[in-house]
């Protein structure tokens, strides 16, 4: 059966080539591929100007096909190499629709979402309005949802979010903006929801609905158990949803328990749906939605029945799809060295046999006959991957000659959490190790800690006879603010500065525990983070310039970067992009150094991905834990742990390092107490 939605996407973007069946038998058009992209003339300049790259889901996975929608999904799915490219692709679809409707004198009705996922889309639409004259005067918008109860002027309200991040920057008419009212009286909610549905129908229905996806599988605030026919209504939020929203409200206890949301039926009535998802923490629910049966337990799976729905993913969010995890189960593939390593390690773990013990029957019984036939025998394959993995074990990660090593830490504790053992080893081996802390991390400090340090300052200054009058003024100002602070209210400048100093002094203490001196610590305090809220500003050109200046001054032989895209607040992604842009700039000037990626706070590298592991002894792991403990404001309970994982970060780090060592042991490799894994960044 053909999926109409896929063909509509192709027609709307001006693609002019035949559709082809995917693994499920659906007819889907191929996506544009470089070179020879086929795009409508009106869109061509924008693709070229912004260097759009479509991520071929088969590239690197060994498929003999190229540039298609991801196979084996029940909803058409495109994968891009970055969230920026996802946002630009979605913006081009919306732009084309608006321009066509404007030319015909018709309104364009958009269903809009909130949160970090659509931020890039809204910034691109604003750019199109300012630089390319995209006219929003005929656009009518309906937002998906709003927390309840919550005042419109509240910082955390979606009313505030939409005006701050889109509406005040474009020429949409105020009367065309519709957002659920978080202030409506309880007895009037049902009537309000009915009128919201009627307003959508009077506008002619939604032309395009923008969606994100929650870790529970919710779309809008339609939590598990929502029915296919439900409409706009008041709902109770899942605990996981509230936990994920904690950062925006400065603590889970401040997140409302209810919300008003469009229903699944309302969303399904839209003519087109674009669902965007970014990051590894969305990968599992994306896989359940796209590859498993439709179920009320995953409301997003209802989109399997939508006539024109498309998932737009970055590579991290696509990571659990079968085409990425086990591509040999999807169809014939080209066996690249990377894919052979992936398959043989997977087989070793699946069969619970060491690499050198794998038999030909193991390959045949696990859908790997083609690999055995083309690259066997089993003994040779096992030995090949055994030697490959053995070569990743590295006891001198910066070599034996003294080198300058620069470690980038997005938050003040990411360095020691993710690679504290390697930092200790580098220092012990005589290298000049420097740490660049990229953001202040000040929004992740509890108010009671801010007050404790303020109180300490007061006592300290009195004890040493330091300016009592000025100290009293600051103390009273901070106390007054904290006593009157509303739930979820952003901090004052005083409090933000105090919290920044807390994180900065903790970072220096943790670095010292690794043998790194205070003058080897760099505090960049990048501008994109300085909002005082979870929502971040775009990367500033000066952010990248600061990193370039650091490279030129320090002249590192190696740098280490957080390659973990599961950071729920997006800070890791933005920091990584800033670093990569800076690396590209200095390379054009002739500066060269190794770039290694680490993980650890939320995820760990898969064993087939790892290109270097650094062994940690019992003593080294204990020292690493002590360094993590120096971040006292994050100890016992971090403000934003980022997932439902109840463990503290030091526990996650210890268990993941031990688990990586256990995997190497299971593969039949030398046994270690713990291992930290790294991957080399490739342009």
Image (tube, grey):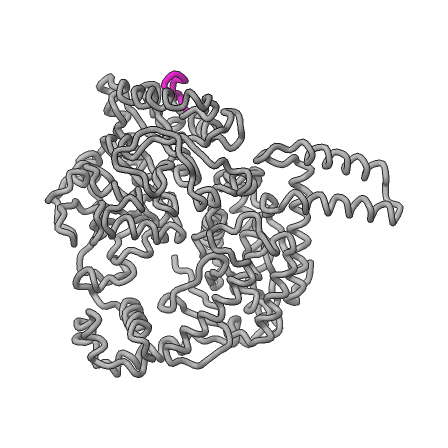
Q: Is residue 174 above or below residue 500?
A: above
* Residue nearest the viewer, comparing 450 with 637: 637
Per the image, is 58 magenta? no
Report if residue 407 is visible in the image. no
**Residue 273 % position (x, y):** 27, 36
Give the residue at the far front of this rendering: 187
Q: Quadrant of the N terminus?
A: top left
- Viewed as shown, does residue 26 lie left or right of 89? left
**Residue 621 % position (x, y):** 57, 71
**Residue 579 % position (x, y):** 49, 52
Per the image, is 171 magenta? yes
- Viewed as shown, does residue 288 lie left or right of 507? left
The residue sitting at 32% across, 32% down in the picture is 263
Q: How many numbered circles does the render carry? A: 0
- Viewed as shown, does residue 120 lie left or right of 416? left
**Residue 390 % position (x, y):** 40, 78
Q: Is residue 193 above or below residue 211?
A: above
* Residue nearest the viewer, comparing 75 with 81: 75
Magenta segment range? 170-177
The residue sitting at 52% across, 58% down in the picture is 647
Q: Quadrant of the C terminus?
A: bottom left
Report if residue 134 is visible in the image. yes
Displayed quadrant of residue 362? bottom left
- Viewed as shown, does residue 38 lie left or right of 479? left
* Residue nearest the viewer, comparing 583 with 271: 271
């Amino acid at each position: 059966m053909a999926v109409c939605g896929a063909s509509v996407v192709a027609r709307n973007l001006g693609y002019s080539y035949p559709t082809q069946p995917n693994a499920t038998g659906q007819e889907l058009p191929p996506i544009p591929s470089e070179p020879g992209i086929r795009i409508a003339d009106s869109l061509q300049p924008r693709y070229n100007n912004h260097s759009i790259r479509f991520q071929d889901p088969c590239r690197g996975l060994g498929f003999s096909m190229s540039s298609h929608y991801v196979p084996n999904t029940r909803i058409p799915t495109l994968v891009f190499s970055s969230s920026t490219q996802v946002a630009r692709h979605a913006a081009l679809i919306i732009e084309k629709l608006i321009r066509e409707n404007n030319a015909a004198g018709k309104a364009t009705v958009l269903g809009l979402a909130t949160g970090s996922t659509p931020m890039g889309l809204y910034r691109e639409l604003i750019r199109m309005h300012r630089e390319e004259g995209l006219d929003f005067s005929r656009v009518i918008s309906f937002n998906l949802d709003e927390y309840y109860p919550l005042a419109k002027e509240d910082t955390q309200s979606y009313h505030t979010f939409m005006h701050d991040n889109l509406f005040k920057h474009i020429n949409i008419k105020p009367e065309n903006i519709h957002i659920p009212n978080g202030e409506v009286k309880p007895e009037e909610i049902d009537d309000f929801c009915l009128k919201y549905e009627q307003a959508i129908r009077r506008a002619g229905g939604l032309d395009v609905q923008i969606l994100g996806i929650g870790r529970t599988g919710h779309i809008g605030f339609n939590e598990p158990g929502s029915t296919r026919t439900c409409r706009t209504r008041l709902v109770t939020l899942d605990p996981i949803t509230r936990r994920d929203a904690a950062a925006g409200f400065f603590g889970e206890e401040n997140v409302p328990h209810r919300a008003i949301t469009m229903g699944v039926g309302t969303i399904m009535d839209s003519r087109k749906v674009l669902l965007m998802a970014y990051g590894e923490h969305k990968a599992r629910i994306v896989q359940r939605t796209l590859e498993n049966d439709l179920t009320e337990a995953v409301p997003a799976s209802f989109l399997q029945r939508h006539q024109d729905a498309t998932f737009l993913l970055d590579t991290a969010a696509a990571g659990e799809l079968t085409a990425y995890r086990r591509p040999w189960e999807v169809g014939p593939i080209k066996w690249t060295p990377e894919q052979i390593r992936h398959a043989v390690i997977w087989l070793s773990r699946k069969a619970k046999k060491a690499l050198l013990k794998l038999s030909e029957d193991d390959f045949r019984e696990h859908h790997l006959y083609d690999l055995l036939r083309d690259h066997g025998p089993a003994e040779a394959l096992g030995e090949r991957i055994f030697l490959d993995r053995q070569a990743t074990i590295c006891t001198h990660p910066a070599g034996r000659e003294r080198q300058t090593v620069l470690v980038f830490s997005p938050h003040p504790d990411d360095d020691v959490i993710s690679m504290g053992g390697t930092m200790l080893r580098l220092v012990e081996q005589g290298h000049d190790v420097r740490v660049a802390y990229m953001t202040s991390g000040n929004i992740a400090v509890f108010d009671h800690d801010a007050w404790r340090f303020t109180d300490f300052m007061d006592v300290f200054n009195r004890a040493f006879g330091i300016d009592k009058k000025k100290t009293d003024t600051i103390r009273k100002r901070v106390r007054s603010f904290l006593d009157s602070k509303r739930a979820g209210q952003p901090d004052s400048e005083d409090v933000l500065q105090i919290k920044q100093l807390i994180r900065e002094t903790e970072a220096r203490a943790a670095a010292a525990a690794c043998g790194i001196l205070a003058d080897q610590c760099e505090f960049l305090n990048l501008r994109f983070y300085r909002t005082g809220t979870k929502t971040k500003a775009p990367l500033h050109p000066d952010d990248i310039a600061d990193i370039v200046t650091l490279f030129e001054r320090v002249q590192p032989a190696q740098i280490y970067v957080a390659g973990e895209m599961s950071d729920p607040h997006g800070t890791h992604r933005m920091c990584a992009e800033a670093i990569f842009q800076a690396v590209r700039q200095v390379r054009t000037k002739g500066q060269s150094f190794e770039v290694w990626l680490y993980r650890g706070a939320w995820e760990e590298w898969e064993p087939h991905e790892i290109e270097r592991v650094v062994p940690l002894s019992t003593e080294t792991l204990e020292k690493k834990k002590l360094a993590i403990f120096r971040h006292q404001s994050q100890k016992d309970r971090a403000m934003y742990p980022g997932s439902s994982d109840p463990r503290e970060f030091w526990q996650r780090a210890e268990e993941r390092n031990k688990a990586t060592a256990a995997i190497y042991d299971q593969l039949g490799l030398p046994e270690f107490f713990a291992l930290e894994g790294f991957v080399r960044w490739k342009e």
